[in-house]
């Protein structure tokens, strides 16, 4: 190996993707040690990392061309030793001149002053802070000022960040293309309107509010089903570059806040709305009129109280069939649809607001490839018959769809391109329905979970590599909306 040209050895090492294999090879010879160290572009370290300044300096010298560093202390206990602190972060910042991507997870010994050291990382493009309990708005402001190349910022579970000067500065600078903020107590969705002109270049935005116990309750608030937040342009900003938008667990009443963004995203391709309170058909209609490039839509909704006049109030989901018609009419490129309806009763289909006719209009108007329905009590065997003629449908995921029976399986077995089927807690589908699927010989993947009338033997008659579970696991509870999703 020592006689091989360095360029050839480098090319060989590039083809080895396993980190453990690369570590073993570096111990074989000094040549491999040096070459492998020079070409290593990413490391992931945690509790086993020696945080002494000399050891960290040696690590950076071994890998002089690091571009991506992930430091993760998840599961850390005091017996694991010391965590990386401000001094350690200074070593990385002052020695890794090529660093473009840094992730700090559960780093409880890094304070604002340590974060300020990142100003040395002139090439830093992406920063992710996951559970940084000591970081405040001051530390974030130092990053905003010092990291002039920053284009992606992810902030998750940072309890002490409670002001938005850093957000206003980043908005004025206008360099961010990706902003993700999750589980914050001190920042409200309306604060992001202060991002101002920064919205113009932003391509991905996520905001998820930190939830409390009251989020599980229906509450007494009554929302105006006729309110139109898009009738006048009260906020002077545009987000025409935004391609991915996710809003979760926010209340858009009485303050409008991020609700207005829905009508301003002309380039939007992926939309995720998870339990956003007070939205109505006007929001979805405004979105559909501006987002002709929309390809993926996720709507997770729960029961809310709506009224259009003082004498009448109804308990239902945010949207009605009018929203489905608007998407079908104005968004001809939609390929992925994920609908989840939480806390609705199978005996009251009107609670959802969607009708099967409106839903099928969407399916027949758009080239849907992936369809996920959770607790869709309006959807039955006739719906299965209608989607069976969909020429593009490749994957179908049904959860708690009680009106779907073996007859629906017989219809869906003839869907031209269907290759992946998931059934979870669909108790009216039996072994007879599995036999219908088996005769079609089309499926490449089948998942059966907590479907009490389907046996493992019947599922294996459809496809041998079936994933089958009869238990009501925590993972399945979360998918059904029983754990933490409300």
Image (tube, rainbow, N blue to C red):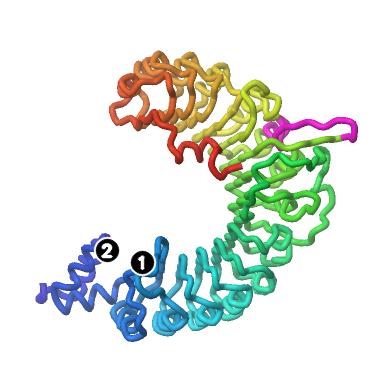
The answer to if 113 sits in the magenta stretch is no
Q: Which residue is located at x 75 percent, y 32 percent?
A: 315
Quadrant (top left/top right/bottom left/bottom right) for the N terminus: bottom left
Farthest front residue? 79
What residue would you read off at disc 1? 44
Looking at the picture, how far across and down is residue 259, in whole percent? 73, 51
**Side of 306 where 133 appears, left or right:** left
- Res 203 visible: no
Residue 346 higher or lower than 226, as above or below = above
- SS at badge 1: strand
Q: Earlier in the sequence, mark 2 or mark 1?
A: 2
Residue 51 versus residue 421: which sits nearer the camera?
A: 51
Looking at the picture, how far across and down is residue 133, in whole percent? 54, 69
The answer to if 317 sits in the magenta stretch is yes
Q: Which residue is located at x 78 percent, y 41 percent?
A: 220
- SS at badge 2: helix
Q: Residues within 10 Å of mark 1 (few under 14, many from 20)?
A: few
Residue 403 versus residue 10: which sits nearer the camera?
A: 403
Residue 476 higher or lower than 182, as above or below = above
Answer yes or no: do the residues labelled 2 and 1 have beta carbons within 8 Å? yes
What range is drawn magenta here? 309-326
Looking at the picture, how far across and down is residue 450, in whole percent? 43, 28
Looking at the picture, how far across and down is residue 198, in whole percent? 67, 66
Q: Which residue is located at x 41 percent, y 76 percent?
A: 84
What residue would you read off at disc 2? 19
Residue 17 versus residue 352: which sits nearer the camera?
A: 352
* Badge number at residue 465: none
Cα separation, mark 2 vs mark 1, equals 10 Å
Residue 160 higher or lower than 240, as above or below = below
Q: Which residue is located at x 59 percent, y 79 percent?
A: 142
Residue 49 higher or lower than 55, as above or below = above
- Res 124 visible: yes
């Amino acid at each position: 190996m020592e006689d091989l040209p360095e360029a050839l050895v480098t090319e060989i090492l590039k083809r080895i993707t396993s980190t453990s294999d690369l570590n073993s090879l570096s111990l074989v010879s000094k040549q491999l040690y040096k070459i492998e160290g020079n070409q290593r572009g990413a490391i992931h370290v945690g509790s086993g990392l020696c945080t002494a300044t000399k050891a960290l300096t040696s690590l950076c010298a071994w890998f002089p061309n690091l571009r991506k560093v992930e430091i993760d202390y998840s599961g850390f206990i005091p017996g694991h030793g010391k965590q990386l602190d401000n001094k350690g972060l200074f070593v990385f910042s002052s020695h890794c001149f090529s660093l473009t991507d840094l992730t700090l997870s559960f780093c409880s010994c890094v304070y604002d002053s340590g974060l300020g050291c990142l100003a040395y990382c002139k090439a830093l493009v992406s920063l992710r802070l996951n559970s940084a309990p000591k970081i405040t708005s001051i530390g974030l402001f130092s990053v905003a000022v010092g990291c002039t190349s920053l284009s992606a910022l992810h902030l998750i579970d940072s309890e002490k960040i409670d002001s938005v000067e850093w957000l206003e500065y980043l908005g004025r600078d206008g360099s961010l293309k990706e902003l993700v903020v999750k589980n914050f107590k001190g920042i409200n969705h309306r604060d992001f309107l202060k991002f101002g002109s920064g919205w113009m270049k932003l391509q991905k935005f996520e905001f998820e509010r930190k939830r409390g116990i009251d989020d599980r309750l229906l509450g007494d608030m009554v929302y105006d089903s006729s309110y139109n937040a898009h009738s006048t342009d009260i906020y002077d900003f545009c987000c025409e570059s935004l391609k991915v938008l996710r809003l979760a667990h926010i209340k858009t009443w009485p303050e409008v806040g991020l609700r207005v963004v829905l009508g301003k995203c002309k380039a939007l391709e992926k939309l995720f709305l998870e339990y956003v309170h007070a939205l109505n058909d006007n929001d979805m209609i405004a979105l559909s009129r501006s987002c002709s490039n929309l390809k993926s839509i996720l709507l997770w909704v729960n029961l809310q109280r709506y009224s259009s006049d003082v004498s009448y109030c109804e308990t239902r989901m945010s949207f009605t069939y009018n929203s489905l018609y608007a998407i079908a009419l104005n968004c001809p490129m939609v390929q992925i649809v994920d609908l989840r309806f939480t806390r609705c009763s199978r005996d009251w289909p009107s609670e959802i607001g969607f009708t099967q006719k409106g839903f099928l209009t969407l399916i027949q108007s758009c080239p849907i490839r992936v369809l996920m329905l959770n607790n869709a009590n309006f959807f039955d065997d006739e719906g299965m018959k209608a989607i069976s003629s969909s020429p593009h449908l490749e994957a179908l995921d049904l959860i708690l769809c009680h009106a779907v029976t073996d007859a629906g399986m017989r219809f869906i077995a003839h869907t031209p391109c269907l290759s992946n089927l998931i059934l979870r807690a669909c108790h009216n589908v039996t072994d007879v329905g599995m036999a219908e699927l088996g005769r079609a010989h089309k499926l490449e993947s089948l998942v059966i979970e907590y479907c009490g009338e389907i046996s493992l033997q019947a599922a294996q008659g459809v496809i041998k590599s079936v994933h089958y579970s009869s238990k009501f696991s925590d993972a399945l509870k979360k998918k059904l909306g029983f754990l933490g999703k409300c």
